[in-house]
Amino acid sequence: MITGFDSIRDFLRFASAREFWVDDDPPHKFEYPPNLLERIGRGIIKPSFGTGDRVLKHITEPHVVTALALAALAGVTFLFYPDLTSEVVVRVIPITKSIEPWMIKFAGFIASQATILGVGWNILGRLYNQTLMQAWKDKQIVPIPLGAVMRNPPQNQ
């Protein structure tokens, strides 16, 4: 049985943390040797979670807001005008003519399954890391979520 968590919320904060910090004076990043499962999991989820982390860190910058707005406009345009949008994309980028719908579905399926597998391995690796779990049980570390910008020292919650 896994112990050391007060609630599901506590477990989710642990599982979804980008990194951990020691809430000492002065606060610093908690360095621990990640085991093989955690390293593999981190490697698998890095493309999706790393991009999300960067976007969340810079969400207030104008170029990120503009890029997100353009992506939303493109998505809505494709949603409401799929035939016309497909024709325009094929004219602008001719190589897209050879992409079949099943290829996009398959790529989405593989990406989602790999992300789920990577998240699971990352969490499992953390749970079996004695150094990390002992520091968590002793309330020595604070989880830092995705997108957090470390300007101020973390306060143990």
Image: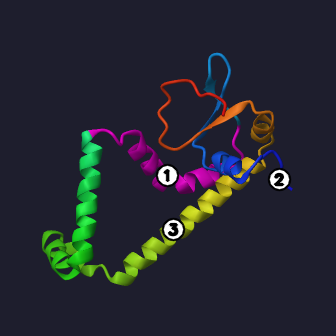
Nearer the observer: mark 1 or 2; the answer is 2
Residue at left 17%, top 74%? 94
Residue 106 picture location, percent across and down: 45, 77
* Residue found at the far top of this picture: 25
Mark-to-mark CA distance, 2 and 3: 27 Å
Disc nearer the start of the sequence (1/2): 2
Mark 2, Cα crowd under 10 Å, few <14 / some 14-19 / many 20+, is few
Residue at left 70%, top 32%? 141
Reply yes or no: does residue 137 show up in magenta. no
Q: Quadrant of the C terminus?
A: top right
- Please report the bounds of the magenta region as a residue range: 33-61
Q: Which residue is mark 1?
A: 49
Q: Which residue is mark 2?
A: 2
Residue 73 falls in image quadrant: bottom left
Position of residue 140 in the picture relative to residue 118 (left or right): right
Q: Amino acid at mark 2?
A: Ile
Q: Which residue is mark 3?
A: 112
Whether residue 71 is situated above or below residue 152 in the rendered picture: below
